[in-house]
Image (cartoon, coloured by chain):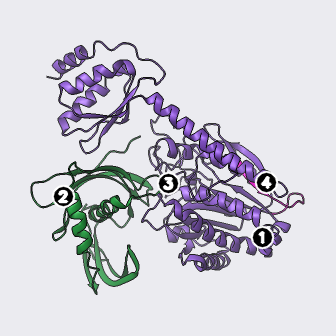
């Protein structure tokens, strides 16, 4: 009976004393369960809170291994329990603290190397800290045209940094570009930092970029959702939303691209906090979104709003919250097609052009719908590579080609904005 | 629209070999989605005009390699966070892709669009017969809801007998 089992477990683990805070001597075990019965035994173990076992993969099905961190004082007792039940395990980490110390050393070393050798590798994916360090480096290397501003803080209090590209003037009309609003779309943050470098280094060399920056400013937010981005590195590579707590729910986060005040509450967004397209309790409830809204409103002269997503290879204009054409449909569609042709000219990558609603699905609360209804005519959303073979897990060797072709599309749009002031 | 039955689509498509982009073959298909109150997989009829590439040699090499492993193959996160797939794991990845196609077909409606996002975990199960068996837990990305759905599937494969998904079940999502 299960009562008997509980007594057996308690007596087997009687020797376990209070477990400490540091990770010295903590072991991480991998348990390969063979059947439902073994899974149930582990779930029983999981319920014994005083052991302070930290399950990295919880017992749920025999098809998945169970990974668990065990505080040092409980290691022997837990192993004895597993062995007495014939449950097989292997030791992933003999001493977690040693692993953590090594990892910290490795990261510090490569960060130091990057800093001193001044060689940011644009063809690989980076941590948030590494991207933020490169923003500073660009602002310093190209200080005559690049400066870094903070437009707010994320939910977990990380700074939201925007790079401003400007050759002077006072509150010139400007172009807004953002990336990484959905944290799992890693090629967008990676492309954005490449694009930052491209703009900075092309000024004075490329006639188009030069004439653009002589008339207009560019604002580039490379990591719109830093909390989510960190989470994709530390915990769940597929995380999409912000990391805000939802009242009354154990589920975390809001879809920041369903949170804008554009058809908010309409079809194409969920009211369930556990959903990956949860719109949030109210429009602009997410500080990441509110910070951008405030910036755009305070600036007053933003003329284009361009946002990067992945994947699907699409170039879209409003609307998403309704399936009716925007007033500027003809111009936006023609410009979108011209931009898609530019993209294709480089590596043959085809982007499908259309409104959000007719191209993917009806989705309310999206950023370019808000910007368009706010009065920013040139509002476009890009979905970068690929079309599903790797999806969010785009191999790093495709970062630079993706960024290069996206840049051509962005440039085409920006040239039109420069030449068609309003 | 077919009254009391569902919606039928006639499609003309071009199939492209993922491993050899220049190789294409034309295909026509008919897909019937049943009325939404029934959860039945859509009916699919198709004709391929031309031939698919012969992969016997590569199939046999992979088959023999796995058959001769001393310890059962176990792997996870394919591709990894950075999109890497090691060459030894590429056939495992492709096999998951094919098998997930079956799972996707069985669970598709006019309002879903599934892609295989990642193999979270794969474990080979040795068999006494000639088939190779792999137990997978995959992540499916559903585009309309944007959800990532874990799914368990048991896959059998043999070079001459092809792929079979003998068992599959949707798994609960972690909070």
What label sits on residue A141 in the rendered view?
4
Counting other residues with Cα less than 10 Å from the Cα at mark 3, is it few (<14), some (14-19), or many (20 or more)?
Answer: many
The structure residue drawn at horizontal position 57% and vertical position 67%, both measured from the top left corner, is: A402
- Residue range highlighted in magenta: A161-173
Q: Which color is chain B depicted in? A: green
**Residue ID for mark 3:** A269
Q: Which mark is nearer the camera, 1 or 3? A: 1
Which residue appears farthest toward the bottom when viewing the image?
Answer: B50
Q: Which chain is purple?
A: A
> Mark 3 vs mark 4: which is more N-terminal?
4
Q: Which mark is nearer the camera, 4 or 1? A: 4
**Residue ID for mark 2:** B67
| Residue A113, position as x, y percentages in the image | 64, 46
> Element at badge 4?
helix
Tell me if residue B10 comes above or below residue A212 in the rendering.
Answer: below
Which residue appears farthest toward the right when viewing the image?
Answer: A169
Q: Which mark is nearer the camera, 2 or 3? A: 2
- Answer whether labels 3 and 4 touch (C-beta < 8 Å): no
- Distance from label 1 to label 3 (Cα)? 38 Å
> Element at badge 3?
loop
Q: Which mark is nearer the camera, 4 or 2? A: 2
> Mark 1 vs mark 3: which is more N-terminal?
1
């Amino acid at each position: 009976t299960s009562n008997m089992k509980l007594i057996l477990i308690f007596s087997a683990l009687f020797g376990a004393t209070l477990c400490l805070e540091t990770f010295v001597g903590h072991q991480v075990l991998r348990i390969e369960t063979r059947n439902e019965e073994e899974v149930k035994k582990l779930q029983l173990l999981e319920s014994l809170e005083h052991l302070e076992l930290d399950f990295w993969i919880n017992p749920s099905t025999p098809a998945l291994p169970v990974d668990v961190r065990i505080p040092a004082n409980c290691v022997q007792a837990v192993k004895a329990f597993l062995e007495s039940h014939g449950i097989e395990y292997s030791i992933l980490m003999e001493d977690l603290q040693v692993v953590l110390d090594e990892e910290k050393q490795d990261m510090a070393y490569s960060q130091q190397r990057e800093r001193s050798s001044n060689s940011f590798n644009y063809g690989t994916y980076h941590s948030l800290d590494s991207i933020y360090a490169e923003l500073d480096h660009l602002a310093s290397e190209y200080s005559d045209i690049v400066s870094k501003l903070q437009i707010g803080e994320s939910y977990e209090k990380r700074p939201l940094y925007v790079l401003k590209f400007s050759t002077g003037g006072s509150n010139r009309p400007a172009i807004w570009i953002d990336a990484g609003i959905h944290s799992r779309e890693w090629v967008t943050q990676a492309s954005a930092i490449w694009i930052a470098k491209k703009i900075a280094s092309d000024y004075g060399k490329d006639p188009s970029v030069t004439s653009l920056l002589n008339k207009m400013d560019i604002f580039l937010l490379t990591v719109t959702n830093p909390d989510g981005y960190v989470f994709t590195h530390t915990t769940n590579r597929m995380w999409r939303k912000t990391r805000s707590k939802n009242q009354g729910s154990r589920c975390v986060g809001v879809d920041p691209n369903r949170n804008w005040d554009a058809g908010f509450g309409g079809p194409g967004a969920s009211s369930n906090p556990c959903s990956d397209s949860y719109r949030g309790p109210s429009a602009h409830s997410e500080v990441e979104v509110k910070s951008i809204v405030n910036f755009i409103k305070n600036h007053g002269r933003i003329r284009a709003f361009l946002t990067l997503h992945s994947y699907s290879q699409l170039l879209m204009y409003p609307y998403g919250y309704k399936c009716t054409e925007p007033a500027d449909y003809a111009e936006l569609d023609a410009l979108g097609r011209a931009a898609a042709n530019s993209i294709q000219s480089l590596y043959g990558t085809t982007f499908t052009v259309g409104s959000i609603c007719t191209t993917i699905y009806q989705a309310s609360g999206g950023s370019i719908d808000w910007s368009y209804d706010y009065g920013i005519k040139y509002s476009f959303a890009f979905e970068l590579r690929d079309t599903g073979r790797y999806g969010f897990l785009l191999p790093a060797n495709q970062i630079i080609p993706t960024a290069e072709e996206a840049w051509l599309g962005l440039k085409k749009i920006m040239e039109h904005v420069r030449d068609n002031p309003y | 629209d077919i009254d009391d039955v569902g919606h039928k689509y006639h499609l003309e498509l071009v199939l492209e070999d993922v491993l050899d982009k220049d190789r294409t073959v034309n295909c026509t298909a008919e897909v019937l989605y049943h009325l939404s109150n029934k959860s039945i997989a859509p009916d699919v009829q198709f004709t391929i005009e031309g031939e698919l590439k012969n992969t016997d040699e590569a199939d046999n090499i992979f088959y023999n390699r796995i058959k001769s492993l001393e310890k059962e193959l176990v792997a996870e996160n394919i591709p990894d966070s950075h999109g890497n797939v090691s060459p030894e794991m590429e056939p495992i990845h492709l096999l998951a892709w094919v098998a997930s196609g079956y799972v996707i077909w069985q669970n598709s409606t006019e309002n879903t669009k599934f892609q295989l996002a990642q193999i979270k975990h794969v474990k080979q199960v040795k068999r006494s017969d000639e088939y190779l068996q792999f137990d997978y837990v995959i992540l499916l990305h559903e585009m309309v809801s944007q959800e990532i759905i874990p799914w368990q599937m048991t896959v059998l494969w043999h070079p001459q007998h092809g792929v079979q998904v003998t068992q599959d079940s949707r798994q609960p999502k972690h909070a």
